[in-house]
Amino acid sequence: MERRLSDTVENYLKVIYDLSSDNQRVGTGQIAEMLNVSPASVTDMFQRLASEDPPLLNYVKRQGVALTEDGKKAALETIRHHRLLELFLHEVLDYSWDQVHDEADRLEHVISEDFEERVAAVLGNPQWGLHGKPIPSRNLVMPDLDTCYLRDLRPGQSGLVHSVNDDDPGLLRYLETLGLVPGASFEVIDFSPYDNNLHIRIKGENDVVLGASVTVQIRVEILDLAVDKER
Amino acid sequence: MERRLSDTVENYLKVIYDLSSDNQRVGTGQIAEMLNVSPASVTDMFQRLASEDPPLLNYVKRQGVALTEDGKKAALETIRHHRLLELFLHEVLDYSWDQVHDEADRLEHVISEDFEERVAAVLGNPQWGLHGKPIPSRNLVMPDLDTCYLRDLRPGQSGLVHSVNDDDPGLLRYLETLGLVPGASFEVIDFSPYDNNLHIRIKGENDVVLGASVTVQIRVEILDLAVDKER
DNA sequence: ACAATAATTTAGAATAGTCTAAAATTAGAT
DNA sequence: ATCTAATTTTAGACTATTCTAAATTATTGT
Ligand SMILES: [Mn+2]
Ligand SMILES: [Mn+2]
Ligand SMILES: [Mn+2]
Ligand SMILES: [Mn+2]
């Protein structure tokens, strides 16, 4: 139950968890790109983690991996550390929301469970991270969410910003100037099928036209305007 | 100037710095014992660090090492992180003084200079650590101190506790119950040459008789009672 | 169906850090 | 001065993580 996983292994598991939400199995190439290592290294790690004593991965040659229950718990443990740390850095040390991610990415592997508990207590046992993503509970349960990418909305639909990707400081600063932060509500005005631009109107802010490279980084909760609900 | 040193290297440098205060050169065996590695591993590391681009150690075969200026700066950098972190864990997360060391020992290698700055600011740029040891300044200068081991005092002398070793939680809890903490003043009542026990009277507390394994872990400032000052 | 292309896996090698066992050197004690 | 005991260094090896280059397998467009 309590093997000491290396930073490297924790990072593999975390990335595999992230990419598992959409797809079923995660492939060698995807991980290689996310972690900036060669595909050969990833294959190697897949094989290692799949043949550990209690395996962390389920690996099917040439098809990729899925997390086992153990692997998933380990991933959630690291993610909980990461999101608690981000909030802590913001609240206690006054980091801005674009600065927290890199620092948390290093600290997440070295803090003790005691540190985690104390930070959670100081923050009031928060359930949501600085960028809107849920924080797994102390016993490592992640809530199910009903969100989709902003990219997938179309004119006439409205929504609330649920969460934004936290790993691009430049994007985060941009979104902040737009007021497009978790909780903001907006309405989709227009869509251009050629470039996938979305023209949206943010409540209390200006209109913007966002390209797909931005809209794919934002998760939203669709506001049901009692329009075509049951048909 | 800004090589990225591994955790391992930082730990070697830190220990070498500690042992350098007394002796001139530090030997293979001492480091091996402090770090719980074999002497062979230490020799290896000595050779590596002495032949880095700007060397971190000055190594004389069979005689041991001394830190170069670069090596000393690197050691002080890590020590500054460590002592700031200990204070931070105590002040902000309510760790007790016997709990902070182990956590700081892992965090010290991964925090950024930005984190260091922010922590220092939150704490009011402290100059002294939780256990009484000085915190190197931002520009890595360590003050000179005029202290000696409690072990070396004799009946009739009085002193102030300056600092205590921070790596033994049990000892720290014991010293706390005695009120033998940095700043406490005491008087030496008796000395037994056979076992090196020191009987001391702590101001506002009870008397105690301490063995050498304890008195060698406490640094004190001798109080000059205007007795035999200039003769 | 089948060759071209893309993705994945294997093979072989490097680096950092560690170990044990053996060899070399120094220090101590007669 | 010499022998013994302790310390240090060398030699050879192992693990974790990564790489490049070559081999293998999948995909896909005709
Ligand atoms: Mn993050
Ligand atoms: Mn945890
Ligand atoms: Mn400490
Ligand atoms: Mn620093």
Image: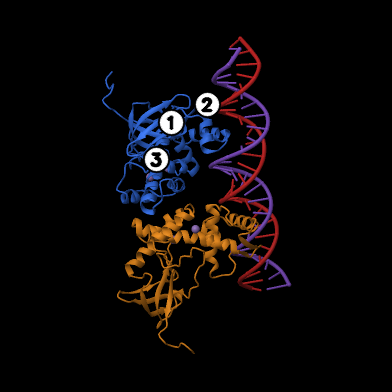
Chain colours: A blue, B orange, C red, D purple
- Residue A19: x and y in percent read 45, 32
- Residue B157: x and y in percent read 41, 82
Task: Tell me the tag on residue A85.
Answer: none
Q: Toward the viewer: B98 or B211?
A: B98
Task: Tell me the tag on residue A178.
Answer: 3
Q: Quadrant of the N terminus of chain B?
A: bottom right
The residue pinned by badge 2 equals A61
The disc, 2 or 3, on the residue closer to the chain's N-terminal end is 2
Circle 3 residues within 10 Å: few <14, some 14–19, many ≥20? some
Cα distance between the residues tagged 2 and 3: 45 Å
Q: Select label 1 or label 3 by which is in front.
A: 3
- Residue C16: x and y in percent read 59, 49
Circle 2 residues within 10 Å: few <14, some 14–19, many ≥20? few
Up the image or down, A115 lies above or below B175; here it is above
Give the letter of the chain under mark 1: A
**Three-letter code, disc 2:** Lys
Q: Toward the viewer: A64 or A145?
A: A145
Q: Toward the viewer: B187 or B66?
A: B66
B10 sits left or right of B178 in the view: right
**Three-letter code, disc 3:** Leu
Up the image or down, A99 lies above or below A24; here it is below
Cα distance between the residues tagged 1 and 3: 30 Å
Up the image or down, A125 lies above or below B48; here it is above
Q: Secondary structure at mark 3?
A: helix
Q: Residue at x 45, y 58 (%)?
A: B117
The residue pinned by badge 1 equals A20
The disc, 1 or 3, on the residue closer to the chain's N-terminal end is 1
